[in-house]
Image (cartoon, grey):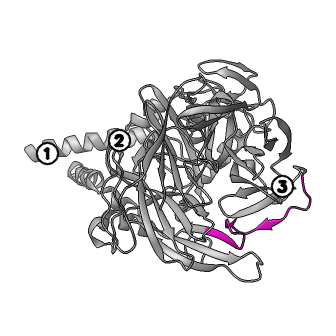
């Protein structure tokens, strides 16, 4: 009887996990990278997440957020960019203003469409690094690592910078998070890709 | 019966270790299995010592150095003169001063870009300050005359030039020949022959002449210039706990030669400096960290380590510097003077601390 009860509990738990993950749209790492790249050049827009694939109407931001002023109808903040390019918790057109999660959610929620991963592990393209401490947070989408181990990321950095792509020293305050549902086939090891005698894998 | 099968499958799926869900890479295996504190041939390195106490240092022949890095300057966070700007928002990139520079007299130039200025500290006090036109500069460098170049990779896409008095004199566009993307510029140098931008820690591109005028075509060299002007230096991670240092004569007729393979006691998060001094020594700095594999996924060991190599590649010293655990972005946390003196900039909750060590 006890075995049946435990089996039922496991089954229920499995179904719950499976149904939760089933809500996350399938997306490949390359699709995530393409979406992230399409946002580059757009303005930082506090609490928002929308842009255009034709790379027009970039908008602008001035001041110091949250007391900043945004002009235009497109742009994103760091978590808006992450939610959109990861397409979580649901599919969302880039032009739809949709900002479902903050850096707090990305850092601490474990029942969503992503898994926390140690920074000691290899990072893959389209993973993210996030920190949230004492009410402050930031999230960046990982692109690659260079010969020095310096990450190259996509990020909506802040009001002064907007959404940019480039190297970024990432302190140990950040943890790694990995989107569910990305096919393993397009996983690509970037960090430590350099070794003596070879410039790539 | 069906339920039993489903339950068994569910149990197996849910109880499967994370490591089995995807094949671990070589790096992951090393992380989990290699006990670096006991297997390395170098002395075990303890967790970096608490603030105010110098981290333990060793030399290649196991000699103890009489003293480790010393604090030479502490500056509080703030906007007023004599303080340094810190930017932290709810949803955005946190940052402190992105870079610093040490002059011949030991004065410390700090790129206080959050406050749109450069401040120069000497004996704990501000002796000079001048304004920057924006808050988005991330690196700077000076030539022997005191002229400055400041790097804005993202917004202005420029190397901005300033005279000896800190007055703007012009700017040079970064992107163009050999620089496809400003965000991949990793350093800027002001040499007697002009301004050079480093791309992705791999190559230098000459973008301006000594007068600050843009050059075309742009010259490229595969590495950083050594201080004595005879070599090009480059470095690359080699696995998870080692880095390779290469040298090649400036003539470029010869291939790069592996000078040394430097092993570290724990995994390298990132290389943070590669420089030579006027005596020909080469110094490589790396930020080292070990992370927990489970919540809270934090770094349970971390510190900066600088390895000093003789011109023949022999290791002559290894110095541990303080950990830099805060989230604030920094572009260049380590500076090495022409005499080989090492400085490190560390962000703390109360302000910024500068450490110094002369190997």
**Could you tell me which secondary element the residue under label 3 belongs to?**
strand
- Magenta-drawn stretch contains A85: no
Residue A96 appears in the rendering: no
Q: Nearer the viewer, mark 2 or mark 1?
A: 2
- For the point 42% across and 65% down, which residue is it? B318
Kindly identify which residue carries mark 2.
A17
Kindly identify which residue carries mark 1.
A4
Chain letter belonging to callout 1: A
- Residue in front for this viewpoint, B2 or A113: A113
Chain letter belonging to callout 3: B
**Could you tell me which secondary element the residue under label 2 belongs to?**
helix
Do the residues indicated by labels 3 and 2 lie within the same chain of the protein? Answer: no
Chain letter belonging to callout 2: A
Disc number placed over residue B207 in the picture, else none: 3
Q: Are marks 1 and 3 in contact (CB under 8 Å)?
A: no
Which residues are the magenta region?
A: B214-234
Quarter of the figure with residue B119: top right
Question: Seen in the image, is B271 located left or right of residue B323?
Answer: right
């Amino acid at each position: 009887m006890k075995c049946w009860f435990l089996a039922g509990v496991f089954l229920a738990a499995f179904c719950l996990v499976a149904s939760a993950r089933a809500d996350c749209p399938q997306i490949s790492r390359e699709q995530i990278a393409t979406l992230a790249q399409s946002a580059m050049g757009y303005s930082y827009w506090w609490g928002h997440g929308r842009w255009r694939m034709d790379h027009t109407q970039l908008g602008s931001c001035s001041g110091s957020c949250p007391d900043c002023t945004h002009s235009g109808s497109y742009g994103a903040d760091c978590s808006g960019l992450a939610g959109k390019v990861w397409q979580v918790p649901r599919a969302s057109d880039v032009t739809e203003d949709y900002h479902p999660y903050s850096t707090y959610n990305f850092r601490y929620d474990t029942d969503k469409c992503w898994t926390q991963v140690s920074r000691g592990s290899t990072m893959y393209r389209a993973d993210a690094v996030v920190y949230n401490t004492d009410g402050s947070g930031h999230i960046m989408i990982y692109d690659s690592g260079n010969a020095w181990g310096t990450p190259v990321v996509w990020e909506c950095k802040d009001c002064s910078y907007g959404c940019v792509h480039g190297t970024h020293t990432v302190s140990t305050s950040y943890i790694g998070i990995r989107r569910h549902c990305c096919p393993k086939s397009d996983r690509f090891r970037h960090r430590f890709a350099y070794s003596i005698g070879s410039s790539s894998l | 019966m069906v339920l039993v099968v489903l339950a068994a499958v569910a149990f197996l799926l849910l109880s499967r270790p994370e490591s089995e869900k995807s094949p671990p890479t070589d790096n992951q295996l090393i992380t989990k299995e290699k006990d670096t504190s006991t297997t390395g041939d170098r002395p075990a390195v303890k967790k970096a010592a608490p603030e105010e106490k110098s981290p333990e240092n060793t030399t290649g022949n196991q000699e103890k150095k009489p003293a480790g890095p010393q604090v030479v300057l502490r500056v509080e966070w703030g906007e007023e003169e004599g303080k340094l700007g810190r930017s932290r928002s709810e949803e955005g990139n946190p940052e402190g001063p992105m870079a610093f520079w040490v002059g011949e007299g030991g004065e410390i130039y700090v790129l206080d870009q959050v406050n749109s200025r450069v401040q120069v500290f000497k004996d704990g006090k501000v002796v000079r300050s001048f304004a920057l036109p924006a808050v988005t500069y991330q690196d700077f460098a000076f030539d022997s005359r005191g002229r400055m170049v400041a790097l804005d990779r993202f917004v202005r896409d420029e190397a901005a030039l300033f005279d000896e008095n800190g007055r703007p004199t012009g700017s040079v566009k970064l992107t163009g020949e050999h620089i496809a993307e400003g965000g991949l510029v990793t350093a800027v140098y002001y040499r007697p022959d002009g301004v050079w931008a480093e791309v992705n820690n791999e190559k230098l591109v000459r973008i301006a002449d000594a007068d600050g005028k843009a050059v075309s075509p742009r010259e490229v060299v595969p590495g950083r210039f050594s201080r004595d002007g005879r070599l090009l230096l480059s470095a690359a991670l080699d696995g998870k706990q080692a880095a390779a240092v290469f040298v090649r004569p400036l003539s470029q007729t010869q291939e790069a030669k592996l000078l040394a393979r430097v092993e570290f006691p724990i995994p390298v998060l990132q290389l943070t400096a590669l420089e030579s001094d006027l005596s020909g020594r080469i110094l490589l700095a790396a930020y080292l960290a070990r992370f927990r594999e489970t919540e809270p996924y934090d770094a349970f060991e971390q510190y900066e380590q600088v390895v000093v190599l003789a011109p023949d590649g022999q290791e002559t010293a290894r110095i541990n510097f303080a950990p830099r655990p805060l989230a604030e972005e920094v572009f260049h946390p380590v500076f090495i003077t022409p005499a080989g003196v090492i400085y490190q900039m560390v962000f703390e909750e109360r302000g910024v601390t500068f450490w110094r060590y002369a190997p």
